[in-house]
C-alpha cells in the first residue's frame, strides 16, 4: 500500500458526505460505520474513531491494506457519480496503524468455559480476541508454526508488512490466548477430541487449499499453484 498521506486523508474526510444511508458501509463485509468514523477523524478525535473501528474489526490494520476496497466501499461511494469516490481505506489505514500498537485485549471476568479455534488466520484471531474479552479461555490450533494464516503465509511481504502480523501475534500472548502451532486437525488431534477438550469449537480454517481449474495436465509436476508460489 502507498505511504499514508495525512493531509490527503484530511481532505478525503472533508469530502465525505457522511451519508445517512451510506452505500460504502452497506458494501463493507464487516459493515464499518464509515460516515461516523470520517466525522470523528475530521474533528481530530482519532482515538474515539480507533476505538469504534477496532471493536468492530480488530483486523482493520490488515484489511485497510489488503481488502479489495476498489470493489466494495470505494466502488459504492455516491461520489462515483462525479468520478471522485472518497478513499476511506487510506483514512482507515492511518487510524488503525496508530491504534494497533497501543491496543490491548483485556480479558473479561472468567467464565470457566473453554473454546478451541481451528485456524489462526484473520477470522480465528478476531474470534479469539472477542471470546477472551468475554472471559473465556481460548486455544487456537493451526497447521503452521506461527499465527497469521494467509496473512503470513499467503500474502507477500511487499504487499503486507510483517510488522502488523507480528503485532497480532504479540497481542495473542498478552491476552493469555494459547496458540498451538504445527497441529494438523484430523492427524495430530481429531475434531471429536477437540469437542471433548473444549466447551465449544470454532472452525475458522480459511482458504489454505488452492482451487483447481479442472483442466488437462493440471496435476503435472511442473504446474505450481499461486498459493504455493506465494
Image: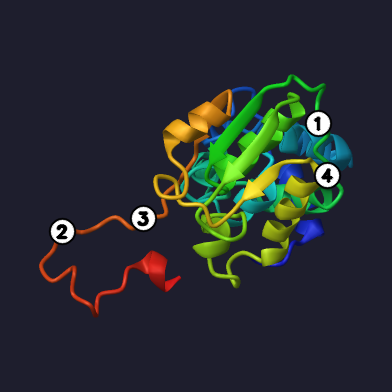
* Rendered residue at 56%/30% (across/down): 197
Q: Which mark is residue 214?
A: 2
Q: Nearer the viewer, mark 4 or mark 3?
A: 3
Residue found 49% across the figure and 43% down from its top: 72
Which SS class for mark 2?
loop
Residue 94, image x, y percentages: 76, 53
- Does the rendering let one see residue 26? no
Q: Which residue is denoted by mark 4 in the rendering?
A: 103
How far apart marks 2 and 3 lie (CA) works out to 15 Å
Q: Which of these two is toward me, 222 or 21?
A: 222
Q: Nearer the viewer, mark 1 or mark 2?
A: 1
Is label 1 in a helix, a strand or a loop?
loop
Q: Percent position (x, y) of residue 115? A: 61, 30
- Look at mark 3 in the image and give the residue it sits on: 209
Q: Residues within 10 Å of mark 1 (few under 14, many from 20)?
A: some
Q: How many marks?
A: 4
Q: Secondary structure at mark 4?
A: loop
Q: In the rendered view, does 100 fall on the left or right side of 27?
A: right
Amino acid at each position: 500500500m502507498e505511504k499514508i498521506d495525512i493531509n490527503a486523508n484530511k481532505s478525503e474526510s472533508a469530502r465525505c458526505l457522511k451519508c445517512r444511508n451510506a452505500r460504502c458501509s452497506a458494501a463493507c463485509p464487516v459493515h464499518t460505520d464509515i460516515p461516523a468514523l470520517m466525522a470523528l477523524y475530521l474533528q481530530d478525535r482519532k482515538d474515539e474513531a480507533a476505538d469504534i473501528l477496532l471493536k468492530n474489526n480488530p483486523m482493520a490494520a490488515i484489511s485497510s491494506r489488503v481488502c479489495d476496497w476498489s470493489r466494495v466501499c470505494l466502488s459504492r461511494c455516491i461520489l462515483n457519480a462525479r468520478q471522485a469516490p472518497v478513499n476511506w481505506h487510506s483514512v482507515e489505514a492511518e487510524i488503525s496503524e496508530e491504534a494497533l500498537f497501543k491496543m490491548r485485549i483485556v480479558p473479561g471476568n472468567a467464565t470457566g468455559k473453554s473454546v478451541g479455534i481451528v485456524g489462526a488466520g484473520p477470522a480465528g484471531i478476531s474470534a479469539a480476541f472477542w471470546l477472551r474479552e468475554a472471559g473465556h479461555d481460548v486455544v487456537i490450533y493451526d497447521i503452521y508454526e506461527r499465527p497469521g494464516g494467509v496473512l503470513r503465509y499467503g500474502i507477500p511481504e511487499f504487499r503486507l508488512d510483517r510488522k502488523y502480523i507480528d503485532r497480532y501475534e504479540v497481542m495473542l500472548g498478552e491476552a493469555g490466548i494459547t496458540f498451538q502451532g504445527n497441529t494438523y486437525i484430523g492427524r495430530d488431534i481429531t475434531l471429536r477430541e477437540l469437542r471433548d477438550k473444549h466447551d465449544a469449537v470454532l472452525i475458522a480454517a480459511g482458504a489454505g487449499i488452492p482451487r483447481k481449474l479442472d483442466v488437462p495436465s493440471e496435476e503435472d509436476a511442473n504446474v505450481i499453484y499461486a498459493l504455493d508460489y506465494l
